[in-house]
Amino acid sequence: MTITILFGGSSYEHEVSIVSAITMKKVLKKSRLNFVFVSPQRDFYLIDTAQMKSKYFSSGDYRKNRQLTLKKTGFFLEGIFGSKPLESDVVLNLIHGRDGEDGKIASLLSFYAVPFIAPRTEASALSYNKLYTKCLAQSVGVKTLPYAHLSRHDERRVEMDYPVIVKPVRLGSSIGLSVVKSAEELDYALDVAFEFDTDVIIEPFIEDIKEYNQAGAWIGEWALSIIEEPHKEGFLDFEKKYMDFSRDARVNEAEIPEKLKADIEESFRKIYDPLFRGSVTRCDFFVIEGEVYLNEINPVPGSMANYLFEDFEALLVKLSRNLPVEENIIIDYRYIDTIHNAKGKA
């Protein structure tokens, strides 16, 4: 199978996307890979596999490669003798943050009828915005932590006990995130967050809270990963998450009671199905007094959460054969013709 890995994008998470793509080079050993880099200017470049090194992109050397055009059915190389399609069975969206997780790429690929592995537009919009994620969880019966929402020009007051955690609404990778221990620290934390977003979400910060990660996909049946209990020091800042995005070694399964495992898996299925079909999604959960709470949805998780699966490459192959199929709407212009004919007789 030939997999086209799409990475980069115009996003604060541009660099972690590059790290994830380089990791896929190590993980996907049986498939033929195309690497398509989306520059900060949103141009598409076909990158030789041998050049998949972080310095190649930071130096700007990627501009030496041939550019691609996205058209119906896929990517094309343009030449003096016309367009040549880039051979590909499926696109794997590995663009983190804006462009990749907000629905832009999903919309483009859907519009041009390109098979792709990633959440579709509607799921992207809901998971990209932490406020919408809360609404989604509530609608399917999955608990979330209480929260406050502030926009950039709102009064800076929080009716919540400290410590709290301040997060930009539309960002991941811990960018712009702060733990605030007192009211005196709130202004600075909000200044940091508002550098990256117009809106923030504020939640209670619970020291030593139990957190578990579950990934999965629908491949005609459920393919759920092991459940991981990440070991964190407080919370992962950007630098720690940057390293986390390069993981390719399988992790150990969390040692938890069967009842808790079943509750986490059921919460994952409620969030995932049916909106996230066509994707490998990871959900991060908190557990408080035995109750499961959704922390966040990672629609394009770092390194695609490959480390949670026994055979990640086989999962992608099966998923590529079970992608959502958009309904073929037949346009026959019967309504317009009926009106035209009726007017002609009048």
Image (cartoon, rainbow, N blue to C red):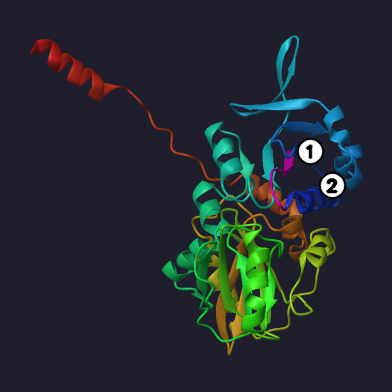
User: In this figure, which residue is indicated by the disc labeled 1?
Assistant: 35
Residue 36 vs residue 273, the one in the foreground: 36
- Which residue extends farthest bottom? 289
289 above or below 25? below
Name the disc covering residue 11, or none: none
Answer with the quarter of the image where residue 224 lies: bottom right
Residue found 23% across the figure and 18% down from its top: 337
Q: Residues within 10 Å of mark 2 (few under 14, many from 20)?
A: some
Left or right, 40 with respect to 55, comes to: left
> Please, what is the three-letter code of the amino acid marked with disc 1?
Phe
Image spot of residue 1 (x, y percent): 74, 39
**The magenta stretch spans residue 98:** no
The foreground one among 10 and 254 is 10
Bounds of the magenta segment: 2-12
Secondary structure under tag 1 reads strand
Q: Residue 196, can we see it?
A: yes
Residue at point 60% right, 72% down? Answer: 295
**Which residue lies at the image location 75% right of the left edge and 75% below the top edge?**
230
Q: Is residue 79 above or below residue 258?
A: above
Residue extending furthest toward the left: 346
Q: Does residue 215 appear in the picture of this structure?
A: no
Q: CA distance from mark 2 to mark 1?
A: 9 Å
**Quadrant in which the C terminus is drawn:** top left
As drawn, the label of residue 25 is 2
Residue 193 drawn at (x, y percent): 65, 64
